[in-house]
Amino acid sequence: MGPLVGDDGVARCPWAGAAPGPMRDYHDTEWGARVHGESAYLERLTLEAFQSGLSWSTILAKREAFREVFRGFDAELVAAFDDADQARLMQDARIVRNRLKISAAVTNARATLGLREGVGLEAFVLSYAPAQPPTYADTDAMPTTSTESAALSKALKKAGFVFVGPTTMYALMEAVGLFDPHLDDCFRRAASAR
């Protein structure tokens, strides 16, 4: 499927929807835009892991609660979460209550601290940007993984991260602007990845 023209006459990637709302706002302002800083990368990595098996709109609706309970995705604070903290999160209906994903968020915060001894999480992820960024006219041609996302997945696992499979890492790469993920005729093409 190619871009959809919204009620405002603007062509967008079809998943953004034709009507105003959170998904369209996310598409128009964030998706594919470069983010900066460790907490921004840890947030996106964590949210992509929580999204596995769910719709992105579900995660987007709970995003502010995720930010609150995971302390702004400050790696040091989340890395210090103990069993009681994780049990508390399992009782918080404002977020996705999945024991394995909550545990993964803590594990990944600890692994993020480990990356500080080297280049840090942001530079680590950025080093897997494709040399030749892909372009697509419609969603049927878009993959869900790439050589780079598989390599990033493998490297993160080696560094102690979990819930970072190739598909999840491809979604992360799109979200944080490692390449411009927008369809060729989307109004955001070439405007978001900076």
Image (cartoon, rainbow, N blue to C red):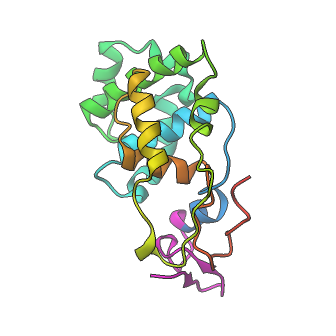
Quadrant in the picture for residue 8 = bottom right
Question: Does 54 appear in magenta?
Answer: no
> Residue 33 appears at what percent x and percent y?
66, 53
- Our reading of the magenta stretch's main secondary structure is loop
Q: Residue at x 38, y 45 (%)?
A: 166
Q: Is residue 20 left or right of residue 164?
A: right
Q: Going by the image, does 173 lie left or right of 177?
A: left
Q: Residue 127, can we see it?
A: yes
Residue drawn at point x = 60 percent, y = 16 percent = 116
Is 8 part of what is drawn in magenta? yes
**Above/below status of 140 relative to 93:** below
168 lies above or below 102:
below
The magenta segment is 1-23
- Residue 168, percent across and down? 40, 46
Q: Is residue 157 above or below residue 25?
A: above
Q: Specify the quadrant that holds the N terminus.
A: bottom left
Camera-side residue of 115 and 56: 115
What residue is drawn where x is 43% and y is 25%? 108
Residue 187 in percent (x, y) is at 68, 75
